[in-house]
Amino acid sequence: MQKITLLCVGSLKIHWITAGCADFLARLRHVCAVDVVEVPASKQKDSSRQAEEESQRLLRVLEKQEGDVWVLDERGKDMSSTAFADALESTRDAGRPLTFVLGGAYGLTDAVRSRAYRMLKLSDMTFPHELCRLIFLEQLYRAHEIRRGSGYHHA
């Protein structure tokens, strides 16, 4: 079973997003080992200092992670759900654990981006970072269902 870590900034505060994330995490427990690791959000008022502080916290956790690091970032590559499923399958078959990094409201620094084996863009649109967590977990579940051929994904 593939080990996947979702490393994120901040905790969930919106109840329906919390419920949605819990639902997808419960579904994923049957197909992969997903661990969500949260680092505290910065309390800095300045957005660039906030992103810097949060990125430093993320980097400290990344130092201890094994396997490939994929950064979820607006500068990343577009990927269809099917292509994402294929990429996940390749890393699973290679036996490599994966860490996905999701920044806070003001994004990530270049220091975090430089750690990426792959940078992935969830959308051209902008979403609140809490909603990005839910969207990502749904796509992770969808990718596993695509590989399983369950019919969850209608192509």
Image (spheres, rainbow, N blue to C red):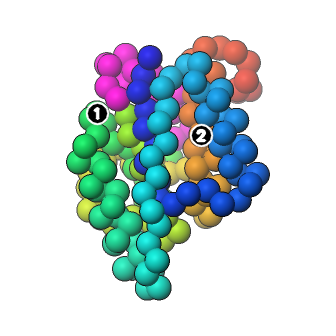
Residue 99, quarter of the rendered image: top left
Q: Is residue 154 left or right of residue 12?
A: right
Q: How dense is the environment of label 2, judged by Cα within 10 Å: few (below 14), some, or many (20 and up)? A: many
Is residue 125 visible in the rendered image? The answer is no
Q: Residue at x 55, y 19 (%)?
A: 31
Query: Residue 74 location, x and y as percent?
Result: 48, 59
Which mark is drawn over residue 67? Answer: 1
Q: Amino acid at mark 1?
A: Gly
Q: Earlier in the sequence, mark 2 or mark 1?
A: 1
Q: Please identify the quadrant where the C terminus is shown.
A: top right
Label 2 to label 1: alpha-carbon separation: 19 Å
Q: Which residue is mark 2?
A: 137
Q: Residue at x 41, y 27 (%)?
A: 3
Query: Residue 1 location, x and y as percent?
Result: 44, 17
Q: Is residue 16 left or right of residue 36?
A: right
Q: How dense is the environment of label 1, judged by Cα within 10 Å: few (below 14), some, or many (20 and up)? A: some
Q: Which contiguous range is marked in magenta?
A: 79-97
Q: Is residue 92 left or right of residue 78?
A: left
Q: Secondary structure at mark 1?
A: loop
